[in-house]
Image (cartoon, helix red, strand yellow):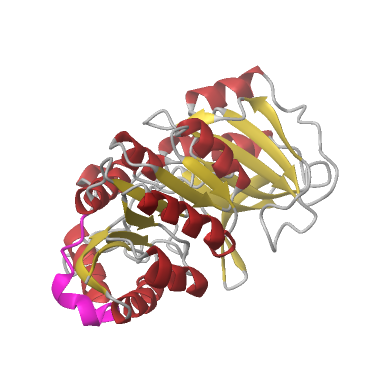
Amino acid sequence: MNGRPLLPPGCNPGCPACTHREMPAQESLKQKEDFIKKTLSPWKDVVQPVTGPEEQKRLGYRNKVILHARYQEKRWMFGMIKRNEFVPVMECPVHAAGVNQVLLFLSQALPPPEEFPLAYYVQAGKQATLILKGKKLVKPEWIDGEAEKVFAFNSIDGLWIHCNPSAGRRLFEKTPMECVWGSPWSFDERNMQYGPRSFQQLIPGLYHASLREAFSWMRPDPDFAVIDLYSGTGNSLRYWTEAGSPTLGIELAGEAVTCARKNVPEAEVLRGKCSERIPQVEAWAEAQRTSGKKILLYANPPRTGIEPPVLDSITTTLRPSRIAYLSCSPGTLSKNLKILCERGYTVCKILPFDFFPLTKHVECLALLDKI
């Protein structure tokens, strides 16, 4: 084995997800750091070592899963697709223990596909969704006292059934979705409300460490106003409002907007694509400047990065004094940083975070100052 660790117990060697699962933690972190320095080579001198979770939190951390469902040998199996082949992932050591227990129960409790055409199992924190490939909502008669005990014991607050005739190409559509057991809302470690479609970071302690770094860099206070792009359910918004800064959030997902408005009522939250809300954001920023405040900006975009029209607005009209940019794709981050640096900003520090231990993925917090 050349000193390399064995696969974690319960790991399916055919699973395509955790490509670093046989690496020691330090080797994985070093490989990620090298990848970031190569991808972000113009700023490699300001890249810091990767911050990862404690050793005991590198396994059992994932309570957000999207798994394909297949009916095999008179029971349901849950797993992933690799080169069009179904790979069962029933006792994954990266999953939280409760996720594996719920999967084991469902594999035996759910009716066969002719009665219950299951396509996916989706879990977001304490909210679980069964996605059916069809239009008809199937009454869940299999939910009995035993099922309720399993859900409650394994920290499932709400169970949903979503009917989606297009399941297999897309997860969620504008088709029936019903909470068939429990509560339609859950609350995270900071008592922030979220629902079944809300995005949840997998290791909250590490995520909030990144937010604290962003806070230390931006230094919000009543003399500054903060624009928060792709603001989610409001975890970042709360940091800025608690410092006394007027705050504007932009978020596309309706469920996340509903939660953000309840979680951080002090912030103004607009729904829509950031590129579609540019006029409102610019008007808000101008009103804040008129009242004597300077502008700060925080962004946590999807893998595609910040849209070009938004970058144009940031660099020509909004002109924030400082920017904190959390990215899940070093590739798109590099493209965005290049534009920002060409238009009057400098990258002062890049802080990588290992939000996905045992995988090749790494997120980066870029801290920029206006020249």
Magenta segment: 38-51
Compared with 183, 355 (above or below) is: below
Tell me what residue is drawn at x 41 percent, y 74 percent. 332
* Image side of residue 163 versus residue 294, left or right: right
Question: Where in the figure is residue 44, as x and y percent of width and height?
Answer: 19, 76
Which quarter of the rendered picture does the C terminus lie within? bottom left
Q: Can residue 356 be seen in this view?
A: no
Question: Where in the figure is residue 267, as x and y percent of width and height?
Answer: 45, 39
In this rendered view, identify the residue nearer to me: 177 or 371.
371
Q: Can residue 182 be seen in this view?
A: yes
**Does the magenta run of residues contain 367?**
no
Question: Where in the figure is residue 162, as x and y percent of width and height?
Answer: 72, 43
* Image side of residue 51 versus residue 302, left or right: left
Tell me what residue is drawn at x 20 percent, y 55 percent. 51
Question: Where in the figure is residue 14, as x and y percent of width and height?
Answer: 47, 64
Tell me what residue is drawn at x 45 percent, y 69 percent. 313
* Image side of residue 99 versus residue 75, left or right: left
